[in-house]
Amino acid sequence: EDARKKTLDLLNQYPPGALDAIHVGCWDQPAIGVVQALEEAGRTDVLVTALDGGPDTLEIMAEEGSPFIANVAQQPRLIGSTAAENVARHFAGETLLPQTFVDVRPVNGPDEARAVHEELGYGTL
């Protein structure tokens, strides 16, 4: 709700044609508020990108004509299983690297949003 209100204020400062895109660099929930504000204001001229790729945002991205055009999806199940494997290795006395990386999935447009939604186990859109 806060992101929606702040975006509406921002849109009042920038008339159509003055703002091309909004990148939400924290996580998906504020991006949903940004999309809601754009739709409420009738602003089809502004595109949205974000980070996280949760099921709700992938669903919004999968809608034809959505302003939410790109995301970077994390893989929560793979993150969880990798963490569990690291814990097991630790308790088994193995030496672990100081950091473990899990690949993210770039998502560009509605077709990729539908594919990643299914790939990550969120179901079919």
Image (cartoon, rainbow, N blue to C red):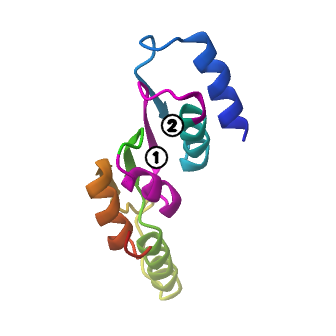
Instruction: Give the residue displayed 49% in from the left and 74% down from the top.
Output: 80
In this view, the residue in front, 39 or 103, is 39
Q: Is 56 covered by the magenta stretch?
A: yes
Residue situated furthest front in the rendering = 42
Labelled pair 1, 2 in contact (Cβ < 8 Å): yes
* Nearest to N terminus: mark 1 or mark 2: 2
Instruction: Give the residue displayed 72% in from the left and 41% down from the top.
Output: 1
Q: Position of residue 107 (x, y in %)?
A: 32, 51
Q: Position of residue 117 (x, y in %)?
A: 38, 66
Q: Secondary structure at mark 1?
A: strand
Residue 51: numbered disc: 1
**Vertical comparison of 103 with 122: above or below:** above
Q: Secondary structure at mark 2?
A: loop
Q: Position of residue 5 (x, y in %)?
A: 71, 31
Q: Is residue 60 left or right of residue 102?
A: right
Task: Specify start and end residues of the magenta stretch as a single range.
Answer: 40-64
**Vertical comparison of 23 with 72: above or below:** above
**Vertical comparison of 54 with 37: above or below:** below
Residue 25: numbered disc: 2
**Vertical comparison of 39 with 88: above or below:** above
Q: Amino acid at mark 1?
A: Leu
Q: What crowding class fits label 2: few (fewer than 14 Cα within 10 Å), some (14-19), or many (20 or more)?
A: few
